[in-house]
Amino acid sequence: MLTFQIPYLAVAGLIIIGLYAVLFKRNLIKMIIGITLIESGVNLFLITLSFREGSVAPIYTADATQGTLMSLPVPQALTLTSIVIGVAVLALMLTLVIHIYRHYGTLDVRKIKEDDN
Amino acid sequence: MFEDLLTHAPALIVAIPLLGAFLTPLVGKINDKLRNIFAIIIVALNSFIILLLSYNILAHESVKLAPDLVKNGVQTYIFGAQSANYPVARIIFEVDGLNAYMIILGAILPLAAIIYSWSFMKDETGQDKYYTLMLLLTAGMLGMMMTGDLFNFFVFLEITSIASAALIAYRTNNKFSVQAAFKYIVISTIGALFFLFAIAILYGQYNALNMAVLANSIQYGLLEKIAFVLFVVALAMKAGIAPMHMWLPGAYGRAPASVTLIVMGTTLGSFYGLLRIGFTVYGEHLISGTNLSIALGWMLVGLAILTIFVGVLMALRQNDFKKMIGFAAVAEIGYMLLAFGAALASVYQDTAGAVAFSPEGVTALRGGMFHILNDALDIGLLFLVAGAIYYVSKESSLNKLGGLARNLKYTTIFFVIGMVAVSGLPPLNGFASKLMIYQSTYAINPILAIVAILASILLLAVFVKVFYAAFLGPKLPKFDKVKEVPISMLIGMLILACIIIFIGLFPNLVVENVVQPAVDALQAVLDNTNNYIAAVLGGA
Amino acid sequence: MGLIDSLSQIYETLNTDSGFWNPLVWIGAFVIIFLIAYILRGYGNKAYKKNTEQTKVFLSGNPEFDDKEKMHVKAKNLYWGFNETLKGVYKILDRLHTDNASDFILWFVVILGIFFIILGVL
């Protein structure tokens, strides 16, 4: 039975490690890697929900006709959407980090502050 | 005669700005002024269709433009099918009273912002991308406010956060704008990821993503509790509720002023998401007279009081004009959450076993709902004035301004209107909604009303400080040649000021006809025929 | 227009549960009181001497400089008394408002934890 719980344990592990990287690491790039880890965890959770034991991929072929047990296609579509959104956000975050480095000269998250007057 | 237009209006409202966004660079290659006029035409057309749709839903049966489209106050639009058969497998836009109220914001704010940015962004480079992103942001915000499907809400939430982050960092030569945009995108992404996690939990349990189907069949077990907490806290972080509010003054303060206007609309869209999930999807269990609604109501009231205090106290210390207004915006969101939390805390179960809001709770709901519209208009007008001051003097710090009322007469008048409206002084619209919040929360617990009134007085102190430092005082020699702002910026501010004065003079008109249907939609879970669910699943 | 039932609905008062508010009556009262005050002001002394001390700005004895920049009270000095009194509160608030992006997410996780605990118990 434990083999069916491994994906959920992996999801929990990925999210916790991602949160640790976002909260406690000081480099901006490591923070972005943490966000990507959380996103991978959530995508893995979505895909795991579509699995049914003994199922095949939800594509109609010559072998897999109407009566065969297929895994659910909707969460797979949700995961694809989420991966695409994640790529766009990652690109935007990295562009902003390039601009920040050009202005501040450092990637330390404690030194990137507003101006206090 | 508008029957065809109104049938497809929910889709057109999102499609027209989207098409306009992708056509804008092509039009911009021909001529710059043509592109600006094209953007204004797209937003004006969109606002017209939004007002038609809202009128059709909110009006009485006898004067609706197309009465058979709206069944019991709800109009649905199904993408790609004739009718929604159960199990619902299509994406649905479902427009009931609450949605019709929120999209009015999406009609007014983008129009004012794009007319304002004709002159405001005149000297900046990359204006093609600016107009594209603004129209994309409008489409995302309107989609967020109309959708009836949880995953669709997540997609539109991400669209708006990506477009907002790019617009906040628009002036990439200013290092503070870029770092504010980075913090905004980090906060948005983590909030949205936990929101998606909660959607996945609910999908795994019920095999449904549609809000109406979930509302019909949701139980209240451990997994649903986890999902509810994730929903509430992620959306509260996006709406700027303390102690997760610290990104808001930086993001609002460092963006160009017209951008802040629409970003404020998306913040209120996240707040609407909180209401929709609390009152509709989980409505059956939340408003049930058990300890849950009272406990949740008091938790939200506690967060709201913290928000109000932190917002107002930090605003008094700031010396940067737009950051100060950003902190005032945080305090105003605290007012809305205070009203809704107090209404939840006043749910009771009478002797017949029926659950109801107490009369003070209903007034609190109406006050909070009314305050959403008022707050967007007031703070929006103040941001536009701040943008005008920046355009004229290129300074954003209050320490270096002074004596501008001699040269900028109209801007001063708009600032006074905005200041009176935000602090809740009679006779403008801030007083009407804040009066309802004061009187209803006083009946629930007097301390809440005392905190709310104190915060209003301190907000007046904040803006009197700004008024003195920026507008009054001796004539400074460096501002000798300053002239009045260009006319398109004045028109943008005039639109907001006219609506503020109109709502202020006739508050009952607005509350009875526009706010009351929205509050009825929130209370729909209490009667047996829940219109929101019935419109999708058919039948009682 | 059927959106307004009758013309009189425009002038109706806003009823909260325990009070009411009518802005048109308020404006009417304001205008009447303003007119009374204006008429009473007209009974005052109309004579003043031009180009003497009476027409200059009142500075309560402070010297007037030529450099107007020095005469204008800066925004950060305006509420000095209030800021001095609440120095303790502001020290705590400033220490909380670090501009650190990780701290934003730390508050998110803290509030998530508090809500989990409270809702789990109920």
Image (cartoon, coloured by chain):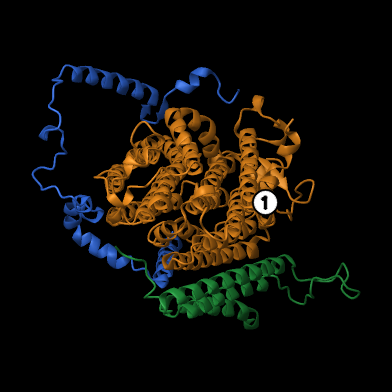
Q: Amino acid at mark 1?
A: Gly
The numbered mark 1 sits on a residue in which chain?
A: B
State which quadrant residue B483 falls in.
Answer: top left
Residue B380 image point, x, y percent:
45, 46
Q: Eyeballing the image, is B155 above or below B417?
A: below
Q: Which one is nearer the viewer's eye here, C50 or B407? A: C50
Q: Colour of chain A?
A: green
State which quadrant residue B206 falls in.
Answer: bottom right
- The chain whose colour is orange is B
Q: Secondary structure at mark 1?
A: helix
Residue occupying the far right of the picture? A62
Residue occupying the far bottom of the picture? A3
| Residue C44 shows up from this direction | yes
Residue B94 image point, x, y percent:
65, 46
Residue linked to disc 1: B20
Q: Is residue A14 left or right of residue C95?
A: right
Instruction: Residue at 66% x, 69% y: name it.
Output: A84
Residue C18 image point, x, y percent:
36, 30
> Where the C terminus of chain B falls, by quadrant?
top right
Q: Colour of chain C?
A: blue
Q: Which one is nearer the viewer's eye here, B511 or B494? A: B494
Residue occupying the far left of the picture? C61
Q: Which one is nearer the viewer's eye here, B413 or B499? A: B413
| Residue B227 shows up from this direction | no
How busy is the neighbourhood of tag 1: few (under 14 within 10 Å), some, or many (20 plus)? many
Instruction: Residue at 64% x, 65% y: name it.
Output: B204
Q: Is residue A84 left or right of residue B118?
A: right
Q: Eyeballing the image, is B138 above or below A66?
A: above
> Where the N terminus of chain B falls, by quadrant?
top right
